[in-house]
Image (cartoon, rainbow, N blue to C red):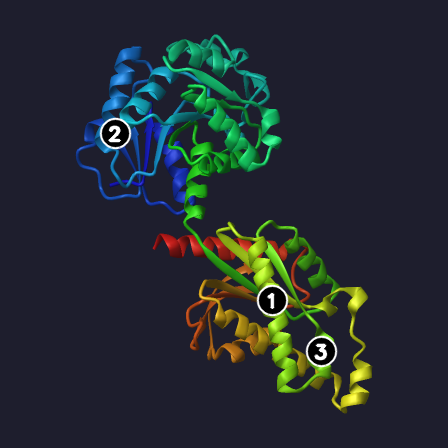
């Protein structure tokens, strides 16, 4: 049975939301109500009951019957797709899905669809900047709209109490916003009407809804349902992404600083001078123990994050810590190239030790061509299966051979990309993990 059930009041509306599910990796099928006894296997089922112009009681009956018939134990998300201009029997339709779910869940009603110019704020739905009751929808021959307020419509049409999440509340943290939702639920509210302007607002509401840890249905024109489905999928993904940064130029330094701003990222710094100066087994052991300690502290800091990004780089990446190689050329008798090889090899060996000691490393990233080669050697890989270009000159593939065989990896040169490149590579690996988790 389906994991996602979308019930719409017309065929185009069903398709509008269904196609968004395809974009985040769910196989999807749109069915007409009369054909719902012969639905092919799909992760998402969208169904049109064509009841927008029906009397309220008939609209309720159809949604209730479809919900009870097509919902199964595998269904983690119920969505009552509403018209983007609030036409139809919104209250009765939402009540019917709530009742068909068979429990005391709430409905999160989010009329905003930024991509279609629909924004709900200050209790008013704007269509391309114009209040709804001043648009052509007000003159619809079948379903004329007399108000721009979704609150007014829901209070008139639903038999359940309605509460609100206002635009100013979206500045709260996800946990705080979830607490506001829980407070509304404790007060007896079953319909939570949420204001929103942007896609980021929808993401924030979706994250808070999941943190609420109470069952709910989505009721929206499609964009919010998509945000929730994406958050659910992400919530199933767990593991560590390991970034090894060998390049020490200004481009890479800016990229590392940007990645370090992300909430799921923790830094581990390796003293490059120690790698060059100390050559004994005991000194290498001390370095490894220091890295392990930094790693443990970093993982504690990120505890609770489903996917954590661990970044290992040398302290010399930043301008104030640059290494004067001429000093070591004199003391070791090695050339600058030989010193660089020593640095990369020892750094990669230590990184490989950390990687192989962690059971939940799910993806790798190596910055700097020599660094990538050294890491492959240290992990026992024989090569890589290149699969896709993330950005120009940054390649995603899977390792071939060794203990990290078939583990996803991205490699890129140190001078490649803009300031957000490491974040984009992180996001790419995250999407890879989502797909692997689904499979």
Q: Is residue 132 above or below residue 359?
A: above
Looking at the image, residue 437 sits to the left or right of residue 134; the answer is: left
Q: Is residue 201 left or right of residue 139?
A: right
- Which element is circle 3 on? helix
**Measured from the top left, where is residue 306 in percent x and y?**
48, 51
Q: Local crowd at mark 3 within 10 Å, few (<14), some, or many (≥20)? A: few
Disc with the residue nearer the chain's start (1 vs 3):
3
Rendered position, 202 above or below 195: below
Tell me the CA gap for discs 3 and 2: 69 Å
Q: Residue at coordinates 37% horizontally, 32% vertically from top-left?
A: 215
Position of residue 335 relative to residue 11, above or below, is below
| 111, above or below 273, in the image | above
Identify the residue position indicated by label 1 in the image. 293
Q: Is residue 367 visible?
A: no
Q: CA distance from mark 1 to mark 3?
A: 17 Å
Q: CA distance from mark 2 to mark 1?
A: 59 Å
- Is label 3 in contact with label 2 (beta carbons under 8 Å)? no
Q: Residue at x 44, y 18 (%)?
A: 86
Whichever of labels 2 and 1 marks the residue nearer the N terminus, that label is 2
Q: Which quadrant is the C terminus positioned in?
A: bottom left
| Residue projecting furthest to the bottom | 333
SS at circle 2: strand
Mark sitting on residue 224: none
Q: Which mark is residue 32?
A: 2
List x then y, in percent, for residue 248.
Answer: 71, 69
Q: Residue at x 58, y 36 (%)?
A: 173
Name the residue beneath numbered marker 3. Answer: 274
- State the image quarter where residue 271 is shown: bottom right
Question: Which one is earlier in the sequence, the residue at label 3 or at label 2?
Answer: 2
Residue 91: x and y, percent?
Answer: 38, 16
Could you say which is closer to the camera, residue 170 or residue 304? 304
Q: Quadrant of the N terminus?
A: top left
């Amino acid at each position: 049975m389906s994991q996602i059930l979308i019930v719409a009041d017309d065929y185009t509306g069903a398709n509008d939301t269904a196609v968004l599910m395809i974009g985040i990796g769910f196989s999807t099928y749109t069915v007409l109500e009369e054909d719902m006894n012969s639905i092919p296997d799909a992760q998402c089922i969208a169904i049109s009951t064509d009841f927008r112009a029906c009397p309220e009681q008939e609209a309720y009956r159809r949604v209730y019957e479809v919900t009870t018939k097509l919902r199964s134990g595998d269904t983690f998300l119920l969505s009552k797709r509403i018209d983007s201009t609030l036409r139809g029997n919104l209250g009765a339709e939402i009540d019917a899905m709530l009742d068909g779910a068979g429990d005391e869940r709430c409905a999160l009603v989010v009329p905003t669809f930024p991509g279609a110019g629909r924004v709900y704020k200050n209790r008013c739905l704007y269509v391309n900047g114009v209040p709804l009751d001043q648009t052509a929808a007000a003159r619809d021959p079948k379903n004329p709209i007399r108000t721009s307020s979704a609150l007014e419509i829901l209070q008139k049409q639903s038999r359940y109490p309605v509460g609100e999440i206002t635009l100013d509340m979206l500045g709260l943290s996800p946990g705080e916003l979830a607490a506001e939702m829980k407070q509304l639920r404790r007060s007896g509210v079953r319909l939570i009407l949420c204001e929103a302007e942007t896609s980021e607002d929808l993401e924030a509401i979706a994250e808070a809804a999941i943190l609420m840890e109470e069952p709910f249905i989505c009721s929206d024109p499609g964009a919010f349902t998509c945000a929730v489905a994406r958050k659910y999928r992400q919530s199933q993904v767990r593991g560590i992404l390991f970034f090894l940064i060998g390049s020490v130029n200004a481009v890479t330094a800016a990229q590392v600083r940007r990645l370090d701003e992300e909430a799921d990222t923790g830094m581990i710094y390796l003293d490059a001078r120690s790698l060059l100066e100390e050559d004994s087994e005991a000194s290498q052991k001390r370095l490894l123990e220091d890295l392990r300690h930094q790693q443990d502290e970093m993982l504690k800091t990120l505890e609770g994050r489903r996917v954590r990004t661990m970044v290992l780089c040398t302290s010399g990446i930043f301008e104030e810590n640059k290494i004067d190689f001429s000093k070591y050329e004199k003391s070791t008798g090695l050339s600058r190239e030989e010193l660089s090889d020593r640095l990369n090899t020892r750094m990669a060996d230590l990184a490989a030790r950390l990687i192989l000691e962690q059971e939940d490393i799910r993806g790798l990233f190596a910055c700097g061509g020599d660094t990538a080669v050294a890491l492959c050697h240290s992990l026992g890989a024989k090569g890589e299966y290149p699969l896709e270009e993330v950005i120009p000159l940054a390649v995603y593939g899977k390792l071939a051979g060794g203990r990290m065989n078939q583990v996803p990896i991205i490699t890129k040169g140190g001078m490649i990309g803009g300031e957000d490149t490491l974040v984009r590579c992180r996001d790419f690996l995250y999407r890879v993990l989502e797909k692997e988790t689904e499979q």
